[in-house]
Amino acid sequence: MSLTRFLSTLLLGLLLGSQAVSAQESNSDETQQLYDIELVVFARNSADAGSSETWPEDAGSPDMSSAVVLGRKSASTSPGATLIEYLPKNTHRLSAEKNRLKRKGGQYTPLVHLAWRQPGFPRKLALPIYLRSPQTTDFDQPLLEGTATISLGRFLHADFDLLLRPKYNVINNSDPLASAIPGHRFQSHRKMRSGELHYLDHPKLGVLIQIEKYEAPEPEPVVEEVPLEAPVPIPTTAAPQSPAPAAAPAQ
C-alpha cells in the first residue's frame, strides 16, 4: 500500500470515528434533556361519530400494570418513575384549546387534561403514564382509561393506548339498535416535533398533545451582603476637675 493511500485510509477512519463519538455525545445530551408534555383527550359526542366504522366485539384493554400515576406515589417499580414530575394546572398551556372544545355546543367533552416533565427516555426504557377521566360509567368505572408513553429515538415518539367505555349500561337499554360494544379502543403512534401542537384523530376520540424542551431558568445572581463595620468610637477628653476646696482649720 502506498504511503498516500495509507494516509488517506487513516484520515478517513479518524473522521468516521470522530463522527460516531459526536453522534453518541449528541444522543446522550438529548437523553438527559427534560421535556414538558401536555395533552388533552376529548370525546366526540356526535350521534353519528364512528357510525361508519366496523368495531370488534371485544377490543381488549390497555395494559396499565406498570403505568406511572402522576400526582401521587406510583406503584411502578421502575427507578425511572422518580424522574417523572407532575406539573400543576397553573403551568398548563392548552387551557384555551380545552375551553374552545367545551364551547362547541356539546360536540366534544374534554376527558383528560394532564401535564408532566420527564427525561428523553429511550424507546425500550420509556414508562407509560396512566390516564383516567373524572367522568365515570354507571358501573362506576372511568369513562376513559389508558396510557400515554413518550420516548426518544431519532425523533420524539408518542404512543397511546386508550379505552373509551360506554357511559350507560346498554344491556338494560330497551333500544334494539343500542350497541352492545363494551368500549372503543384507541391505539396510536405518532412521531413528534418539540414545540409543535399535534392532533391525533379517532372516530370517537381526539388527542391534542404538545411537547416542549424544558430549559431550567438561569439562577439569580447572589449578591453578597457586606456587613457594615461598627463605627469606631471617638475618644473624648474628660474636662479637668477643679481641686476640692481646702478644709477650714480647726478652731
Image (cartoon, rainbow, N blue to C red):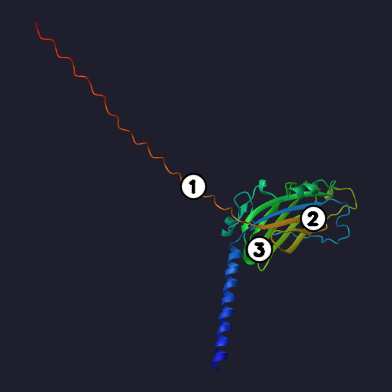
Q: Which mark is residue 151?
A: 3
Q: Nearer the viewer, residue 95 or 159?
A: 95
Q: Nearer the viewer, residue 192 or 58?
A: 192
Label 2 amino acid? Leu
Return the x and y of residue 193 as percentages of the image width and height. Answer: 70, 62
Q: Which residue is mark 2?
A: 205
Mark 1 residue element: loop
Q: What residue sits 60% from the left and 68% below the top?
A: 27
User: Badge 2: how crowded within 10 Å, few (<14), some, or many (20+)?
Assistant: many
Return the x and y of residue 5 as percentages of the image width and height. Answer: 57, 90
Label 2 to label 1, Cα distance in Å?
Answer: 53 Å
Report the side of 9 relative to 166 (left or right): left
Q: Is residue 125 visible?
A: yes
Q: Are marks 3 and 2 in contact (CB under 8 Å)?
A: no
Q: Which residue is mark 1?
A: 223
User: Badge 1: how crowded within 10 Å, few (<14), some, or many (20+)?
Assistant: few
Q: Is residue 191 above or below residue 163?
A: below
Q: Are marks 2 and 1 in contact (CB under 8 Å)?
A: no
Label 1 amino acid? Val
Label 3 amino acid? Ser
Q: The N terminus lies in which quarter of the figure?
A: bottom right
